[in-house]
Amino acid sequence: MAADMTAEKLTLFIDGREVQARPGIDLLTACIEAGVMVPHFCWHGAMGSIGACRLCAVTVRDEHGERLEMSCMTPAARGQHVSTTAPDAARFRARIIEWLMLNHPHDCAVCEEGGACHLQDMTVATGHHRRRARFPKRTHRNQDLGPLLTHEMNRCIACYRCTRFYRGYAGGRDLDVFGAHDRVYFGRAEDGVLESPFAGNLAEVCPTGVFNDRHWSKHYARPWDLMRTPSVCGHCSVGCTLTVSERGGTLRKVENRYHGAINGFFLCDRGRFGPLGAQAPGRLTAPQISGAPATPGEAMARAAELAARGAIGIGSPRASLEANFALRRLVGPARFFAGVSDAEAALAARTAAMLAQGPARIASLKDIETADAALVLGEDLTGHAPRAALALRQTARAAERALAAEKGVALWLDNAVRVAGEGRRAPVTLVTPLPDALDDVAARSLRRAPDAVASFGMAVAAALAGESAADPEVAAVAQELAAAQAPVVIAGAGLGDSGCAEAAAAVAAALGARAGLALFLPEANSLGLALLAPVGGLESAAAARGEAPAIALEPVAMPGAEVVALAVRAPGPVAVALPVAHPTEAAGTFVNHEGRAQRLFAAVPEGPPAAWRVLSALAGGLFRRGAAETETLDDVLAAMAAALPVLAGAATAAPGAGDIPCVARAPRRFSGRTAHDLAGRVAEGAPPADRDAPLAWSMEGAPAAAAPAALGTGAADPGLHSPSAVCLSQSHVGGPLKGGDPGVRLIAPGAGGPPLAPPPPPEGPGLRVIPLHDPFAAHPEDLASPLLAARAPAPVLRLHPDEAAALGETARVGDTRLPVVADPAMPRGHVGLPAALARRLGARAVVEGEA
């Protein structure tokens, strides 16, 4: 799919206009990149086409004469004359639409896709408006596909996008196409939950509404009546960009927002459905003092009293830079700690230092997708950073396409299938303690205990430096990486210590500047919190506070401490609980695994106060002394840039509130205005103001087409309203946005910085912990979303069968009792625990059996 952007352009003519096209692309892509929209269904910016719908017909004239061609299946060539408006092509497209509509239920009035439907757009584009069929329509039975998606097969037009994404792009195996001719059926062999953690993308991939977001179906509003706000996912360190839609003060839908360097066209299900947990039951809606309801004045007075007693601050890697900086400013840099273990805080600081020291470049997800070799050390990417796992799968697809080209075999529906049974796989090596979801695409899947994973990586680094390798696997991996033009090395905090990250940095350093290094930390803002330089983690905080109170950005348990918790959900026993906005409800900045600062904005008007505003009010103003009620996000960013130069770039991650004309959150066809015949008799009221963003809570303002990428609120093309149209006029298809992708890098490889010693290896009694990552539940907050909770597996404790036999059916770890599962894949002397529990307990845990 990707073509060399630096290669010499081709000159061709589209509708009489001379255009320049990238070599290696098809005519449909060339037309779209030239701003000419050709009707289409089966073509997709990330998956190309299979010529199934036949809707993209154009006439092509070259040295072979003039003929009708399907533009998605015809390579762009120098000197071609292409007509999208020729009568023959227009008539052909009109007949295709009429044929596709013969069996369609015509249920636009009740279909959730209505108003955002690619079939509607294409039907209007081709001028079709009358049915000539006089026979009964074909009908299908729908399936129950689980809690995330609905299924309405009667809307299907057989474009094959769903199976091409699910099986070919995402590697799923439980969705397929059945039947033949005009009776094809897209679904499972039997009813059941779609297993892939990327299944939610089917709601956007499908152009007609066969698959739809079940939450959207239950909390429906017409697409033209939604306020759309650009946001950033807060559920892992990848930092995917989102569009969050609101109606009547409630979140209705989360969709992918295109980012050329990160998520492209797709999200994982944790990112798509996790933010909807913001309005799930259990929210802290009023202040509390010692668990009892209190007035805001009483709670703030008590919190201010505790803050004045020399309180320490406990920051959060799930809170914005602004919230953490406000807490640091309130308590002072020397009394600001991270709300994670000392080991995790040290690992995050060490990760920031390794990325800054270079010499390897920091790898984005796009770099991972286009790598020609990859080494993964210790990371369960599908559970820890799911969107990164999807990116790595594309390295395998590229290898399959290259092999298919060599053998002259066309890869049609499933690009992950081995071509002609030869079995050549992508140059991807996984070195992990347990079987991995990416094993099916890796050339090597090596099982090593956690400490041995790091040793393997260090041995590869030594082999790259010229030392002989006794292990043949080490030698083979080193040879493969050395021969690659754009290798990537991937590691992170997935095993709970720094060994794998240190080894990955050593391998990347041995490869030099051509290598990419990707280090994934546990939370969305783990790297941002590290750049704020906390003194330590929770253990250090407990030792340093003495008798002082603590102010925390999320509830923490500190024995004997009076804690002021700024909480989204009702906390356990604390001195004061103050309700604050969920990340989707307030403007702020997150820093992803690349060190890319990205802005998210409040997706609901007049929601709970941002955490930084509550902290400023405690002090009577932190950024405009004595004027806390007038402070804006821009004031916080300016103060942060002055205090911490490493974070100065965060202020430029998006325009300030007064920098440009406001961008409309609502589309031009928004129907929230008073009807004309009621003008003057029904008060409209002024829309709410947003002090922290150049975004308007109305249809008035700059259109999305004129907005910078950081403020994009949806498809901008007139007449194109579906997710299929997003970015088609704004980007090289599958490449960066023309105006630049959102966000700004805060870390420059080679910039150096103070060398940090790696955290000490895990020691202590008990078994070595292997965190069990799950793509639907990385953190207890993820389970606040009922949709993710319905997909998350029950927590268990995994042991080697020999060790499990001695414990019985259940075992206790700390204060938690879990069912015991005997797993032959678990190495002896290790225990597998849910990732959230593993982070709380540390790298070692004592397991006690129960009768």
Image: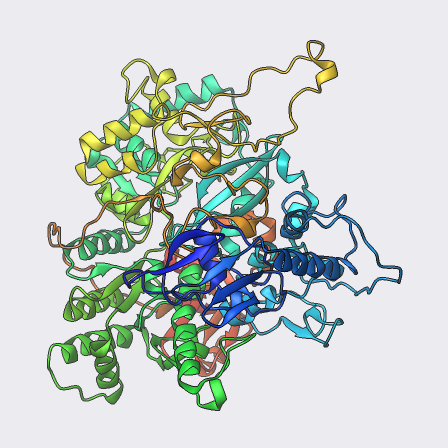
Residue 604 place in picture, x, y as percent: 53, 31
Note whether 422 is above or below 221 in the view shown: below
Q: Nearer the viewer, residue 712 or 731?
A: 731
Quarter occupied by residue 92: bottom right
Could you tell me which quadrant the C terminus lies in? bottom right
Q: Is residue 573 visible?
A: no
Note whether 851 is above or below 678 in the view shown: below
* Residue at 67%, 47% in the rendered image: 124
Quarter occupied by residue 632: top left
Residue 156 place in picture, x, y as percent: 70, 61
Q: Residue furthest top?
A: 680
Q: Nearer the viewer, residue 793 or 577?
A: 793
Residue 796 place in picture, x, y as percent: 52, 67
* Residue at 46%, 72% in the rendered image: 437
Image position of 10 (left or right of 465): right
Q: Is residue 263 visible?
A: yes
Note whether 466 is above or below 587 in the view shown: below
Image position of 376 (left or right of 241): left
* Residue at 45%, 22% in the rendered image: 299
Could you tell me which quadrant the N terminus lies in? bottom left
Image position of 795 (left or right of 771): right
Q: Nearer the viewer, residue 340 or 703?
A: 703
Image position of 450 (left or right of 178): left
